[in-house]
Amino acid sequence: MKARVTVMLKSGVLDVQGEAVRHALGTLGFAGVNGVRQGKVIELDLAETDKTAAEAAVKTMCDKLLANTVIESYRVELI
Amino acid sequence: MKAAVVTFPGSNCDRDLAVAFERAGFEVSRVWHKDTALPAGTDVVGVPGGFSFGDYLRCGAIAAQSPIAAAIRSHAGRGGYVLGICNGFQVLTEMQLLPGALMRNAGLKFICKTIGLQVATTDSAFTNDYAKGQQIAVPVAHHDGNYTIDAEGLAALHAEDRIAFTYTNNPNGAAADIAGVLSANRRVLGMMPHPERVVDPNTGGTDGAALFASLMGGMALA
């Protein structure tokens, strides 16, 4: 089973890299980009075949390592 | 007094940190990230700067899960002293031994220069040889030193006088100009600037020496 984890900065946290990307898009002439948030996608290839168990395991992985929950939130999708 | 300096793959200034401890009178041992225990009788652990594990995933995130990190956690839990500098500060926040997180510098650039710091509290074993409000010159060398903490956490740091150092001219966007913070028991200090780089007049200054001398004196009294 595969899982895709999307890690993003929490909404209240200023994303300075996203802001730089937004600025660069404006410089390129793309008008009307009101905001850019940059995050990361982590794909996991799991031996687990049970969906519920896989999701629980990946959430634990996120809490322990894949995301820093002080500043980041995460979303888990099984694919 | 015994100090242990940790080395991760990608650490730097770990030797400088060992020399800074030695000059202050500590007996220093070096430990590797795969070690599962600190040397018996370790009083203070130094977690050095650098780019542990290539800063993969997040700065300090992989180091925070290493075998020695578990030993550092137990040491801190017993009331032991821990000093995390630069990447070491990032490791200690990733371990949640210190609150908040270090994010990419607001200007997005790597900053490598000597900057001004103000000693914000002298109520710690690390800072009691300085004067409150004293300004010192210490180098920084980081890409991710933008200290971030929620409003509640920041209020607690202020209320409990746990901000050790502030920048006189904030280089990286850090909340409340914070350059270094203390744990609730005041025995864990994390800071982005490198005091171990300024303990010898031949290599740029001596403003960091008081931190190590202070720690030696403070621990001898404790």
Image (tube, coloured by chain):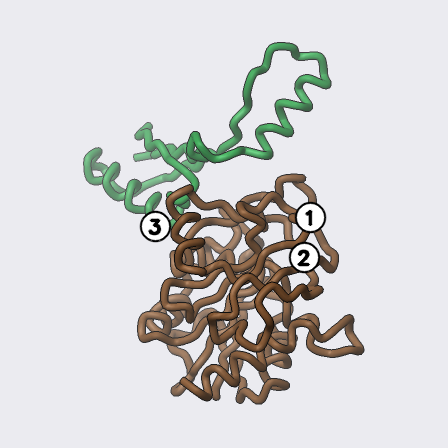
Chain colours: A green, B brown
Q: Secondary structure at mark 2?
A: strand
How many discs mark residues in the rendered view?
A: 3
- What amino acid type is highlighted by mark number 1? Phe
- What amino acid type is highlighted by mark number 2? Ala
Residue at image coords 48%, 66%:
B189
In this view, B219 is above or below B137 = below
Q: Which mark is residue A64?
A: 3
Pointer 1 with pointer 3, Cβ within 8 A = no
Residue B186: name its quadrant: bottom left
Q: Residues within 10 Å of mark 1 (few under 14, many from 20)?
A: some
Pointer 1 with pointer 2, Cβ within 8 A = yes
Residues at marks 1 and 2 on the same chain: yes
Residue B141: name its quadrant: bottom right
Q: Which mark is residue B141?
A: 2
- What amino acid type is highlighted by mark number 3? Lys
* Image coords of residue B67 (percent x, y): 39, 67
Q: Secondary structure at mark 1?
A: loop
- Viewer-side label of 1, 3: 1
Chain for disc number 2: B
- Viewer-side label of 2, 3: 2
Residue A67 visible here: no
For the C terminus of chain B, which image quadrant? Answer: bottom left
Q: Is residue B77 left or right of residue B31?
A: left
Q: Residues within 10 Å of mark 2 (few under 14, many from 20)?
A: some
Residues at marks 2 and 3 on the same chain: no
Residue at image coords 33%, 71%:
B74
Q: Which residue bears the numbered disc 1?
A: B110
Residue at image coords 67%, 39%:
B107
Chain for disc number 3: A
